[in-house]
Amino acid sequence: MAKINRYTGDLKAFGSGALALERTVFGSVTQSDTLDSNINADFLRGWENGTDINGYPTKQFFNAVGFTATQILAYLHQIGLAEWDILQEYNTDSFTNRNGVIFVSLSDANIGNDPESDAVNWKRSTGNIDSVVVTKILTSGTYEKPDNLISLTVEVTGGGGGGGGADGQGASTVAAAGGGGGGGTSFKSILSSALLSSETVTIGAGGAGGLGNVKGVTGGASSFGIHANGLGGEGGNQSVGTAVLQTITAGQGATGTSGQINKTGGNGERGVILSVDKGASGGGGGTMQGEGPRGERVTVGVLANGADGVSYGSGGAGGAVQGSTADRNGGSGANGVVIITEYLGV
């Protein structure tokens, strides 16, 4: 059958323009335009009570039947989806309109359960997206799921590893430590139905830089409930002053886990000792959130602490010392982050 085109205009019921008592309530001699009055016991019984003394239906009662049936159609054209009623029976997958919000029934013989307060027998319809909200979470806490959430995408990055410390050994020596690794990142899209009403959010702390002959600390892991995790980057190795050509191991970038997409943070850069007064400490590894800090170029008399990570989850740079017995620390890794993009219905 071909598509029936919608009536162009404000659809009204059959007989709605009846004058005086040309149309009466079924089985009555009064007129009313309300459905509550027209759908009465006589209407529900049918023509048994809807006839005159000769047993024939009256014109007024024919108008009553036509009006009542088409008034229901007019109501549906106007409202779009029937409003919830406490006496109406709903079955599984039935839809209703409650104060402008669409709900779907989760049970049969669903009577008297208010969709706005009953999450056992009703759920919000995952209809069209009304708005998108992006939230960047920088401290550990709890995520509370909005009632109108359709789905969300979460991006979880772990903390960066600290840069290694530099242990100066006096004249004609160089210490150039390795940089810390970047935290891993996990991406995951999650339907509202797969989330708890409250989800624990953990933000991994950046690892502290080492001081002197101490390796940088590995960064902490970030997580969003059980759904997505970003592990913390490894700390960079320390460097003890020497004149011998060598490289200093950097921290490895960590991985994301449990996501639909998991990315590994950037490795820190190695420290390099070239001669008695030349070299460079290692820079920190970057993440999906941005680059890590650069290492320090070693020249005569350099006494440099490693730069801290700036981008979320990036590693700290290694410390550097030339020609001194002083110690210098590596930079601290940057804290991780959880970024939530919510897709909200009405």
Image (cartoon, rainbow, N blue to C red):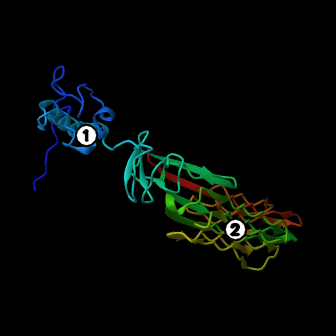
User: Three-letter amino acid code at disc 2?
Assistant: Gly
Query: What's the residue at 43%, 57% (across, down)?
Result: 109
Q: CA distance from mark 1 to mark 2?
A: 81 Å
Dividing the picture into quarters, in which one does residue 340 lie? bottom right
Residue 211, x across and y down, in percent: 84, 65
Classify residue 279 as left or right of residue 102.
right
| Up/down of 15 relative to 143, above or below | above
Nearer to the camera, 7 or 138: 7
User: Three-letter amino acid code at disc 1?
Assistant: Phe
Q: Earlier in the sequence, mark 1 or mark 2?
A: 1
Query: What's the residue at 69%, 53% (across, down)?
Result: 139
Dot 1: element: helix
Q: Quadrant of the N terminus?
A: bottom left
Residue 35, x across and y down, in percent: 30, 34
Nearer to the camera, 122 or 155: 122
Query: What's the residue at 73%, 74% (across, down)?
Result: 273
Nearer to the camera, 136 or 332: 136
Q: Is residue 336 visible?
A: no
Residue 14, x across and y down, in percent: 16, 34
Q: Is residue 242 visible?
A: yes
Residue that numbered label 2 is attached to: 180
Query: Alpha-carbon neighbours of circle 2 within 10 Å: few (<14), some, or many (≥20)?
Result: many
Dot 2: element: loop
Residue that numbered label 1 is attached to: 43
Classify residue 23 as left or right of residue 78.
left
Number of residue marks? 2
Nearer to the camera, 157 or 3: 3
